[in-house]
């Protein structure tokens, strides 16, 4: 199998690329290198390209044909929720424009298998603690909207020209499968806490009065290595003639509170830091976890690593 991985030099992408190499797949990485690291992709063929660029379709088509690509894992996207609110045009241009060029190049090249990196942000603020894929999607920011539109685009391509697509809705991704593949972006809770500790500051918790056991928000944290393995399982799923579903939650099925995550970081780091409690942020639901029965039954995939392993691996990667 020859797999094109967009965003393959990034945090999640580099884990996917490494697993593909471990099973001897040929890999072509396409990345604009805005946050990627070239050394992470090993011996993969590489094309530096912004997917939404005017000439991206032509360059993608040429690269797909030259490297005999048979499947695509599409991870490349802008993903900062706050920035998407401030600069929605940028997110529509890059996330939807990039998806348009990629699908066009795939159709022109006869490549009909796509694993799409979606997000739990497609759900918005559902009024349930455990979210199934049948939950009505109502994203509350442009980032979530672009991911939902990407799912619509893959569905339309399936109807129009037979694309086989699996949309993976990630929950909260953290940890490191290998130390050199650590999350270098300070966007999610674990790296944000690490950055605060490195700067000698107290980590901030937004809200300690939620209707949860300890008052802090509960989220479903999935180890990045488990998530990468889900992509490999998705590729295998697309080889089946019978595929009942196209959209899958990727999580553990259980949640951890912010205070529980901080307690694990104290344990792993050996630092007994103070916590800065501030008011709630608008738009934060008290609890949000994935119902993972679909991916478990259809892929035979299940997260193997828990919160302690997530925090231990993330801390070891920066120590």
Image (cartoon, rainbow, N blue to C red):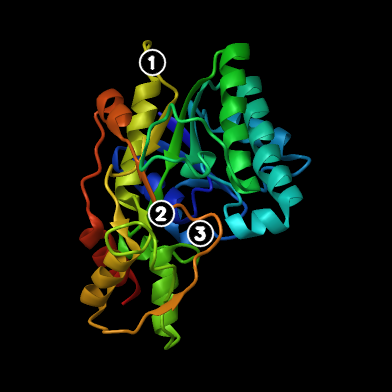
137 up-or-down from 44: above or below:
above
Instruction: Tell me whether the residue at label 2 lies in contact with that at label 3, contact meaning CB atoms closer than 8 angstroms.
Output: no
Disc 1 versus disc 2: distance between alpha carbons? 34 Å
> What's the distance in space between the residues labelled 3 and 1, CA to CA?
35 Å
- Label 2 sits on a secondary structure element that is loop
Q: Residue at x 45, y 56 (%)?
A: 11
The mark that comes first in sequence, 2 or 3, is 3
Disc 3 or disc 1, which is closer to the eye? 1
Q: Secondary structure at mark 3?
A: helix
- Whichever of labels 3 and 1 marks the residue nearer the N terminus, that label is 3
- Measured as percent of width and height from the top left, residue 257 is found at 31, 60
Image coordinates of residue 164 in percent, x first then y, are: 49, 20
Disc 2 to disc 3, C-alpha distance: 38 Å
Q: Position of residue 210 (x, y in %)?
A: 39, 60
Mark 1, other Cα within 10 Å: few <14 / some 14–19 / many ≥20: few
Look at 54% across and 18% down and name the residue there: 163
Where residue 107 sits: x, y (%)? 63, 21
Quadrant location of the C terminus?
Answer: bottom left
Q: Are marks 1 and 2 in contact (CB under 8 Å)?
A: no
Q: Which residue is mark 2?
A: 286
Whichever of callouts 1 and 2 sits on the residue coming sooner in the sequence is 1
Q: Is residue 312 left or right of residue 87?
A: left
Judging by the rendered image, the residue that carries numbered circle 3 is 38
Pointer 1 residue = 243
């Amino acid at each position: 199998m020859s797999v094109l991985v967009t965003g393959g030099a990034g945090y999640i992408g580099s884990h996917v690329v490494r697993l593909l190499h471990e099973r001897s797949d040929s890999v072509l990485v396409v990345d604009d290198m805005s946050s990627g690291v070239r050394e992470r992709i090993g011996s993969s063929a590489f094309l530096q390209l912004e997917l939404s660029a005017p000439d991206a379709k032509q360059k993608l088509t040429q690269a797909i044909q030259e490297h005999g690509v048979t499947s695509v894992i599409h991870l490349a996207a802008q993903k900062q929720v706050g920035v998407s609110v401030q600069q929605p045009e940028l997110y529509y241009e890059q996330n939807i424009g990039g998806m348009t060029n990629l699908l066009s190049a795939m159709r022109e090249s006869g490549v009909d298998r796509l694993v799409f990196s979606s997000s739990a942000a497609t759900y918005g603020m559902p009024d349930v603690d455990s979210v199934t894929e049948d939950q009505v999607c109502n994203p509350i920011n442009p980032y979530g909207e672009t991911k939902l539109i990407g799912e619509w685009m893959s569905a339309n391509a399936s109807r129009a020209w037979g694309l086989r697509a699996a949309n993976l809705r990630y929950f909260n991704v953290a940890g490191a499968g290998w130390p050199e593949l650590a999350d270098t972006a300070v966007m999610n809770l674990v790296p944000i806490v690490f950055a605060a500790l490195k700067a000698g500051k107290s980590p901030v918790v937004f809200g300690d009065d939620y209707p949860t056991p300890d008052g802090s928000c509960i989220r479903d944290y999935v180890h990045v290595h488990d998530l990468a393995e889900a992509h490999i399982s998705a590729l295998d799923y697309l080889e089946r003639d019978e595929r009942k579903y196209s959209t899958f939650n990727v999580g553990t099925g259980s949640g951890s509170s912010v205070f529980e995550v901080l307690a694990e970081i104290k344990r792993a780091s050996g630092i007994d830091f103070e916590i800065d409690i501030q008011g709630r942020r608008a738009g934060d639901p008290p609890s949000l976890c994935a119902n993972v029965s679909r991916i478990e039954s259809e892929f035979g995939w299940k997260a193997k690593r828990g919160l302690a392993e997530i925090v231990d691996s993330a801390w070891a990667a920066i120590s």
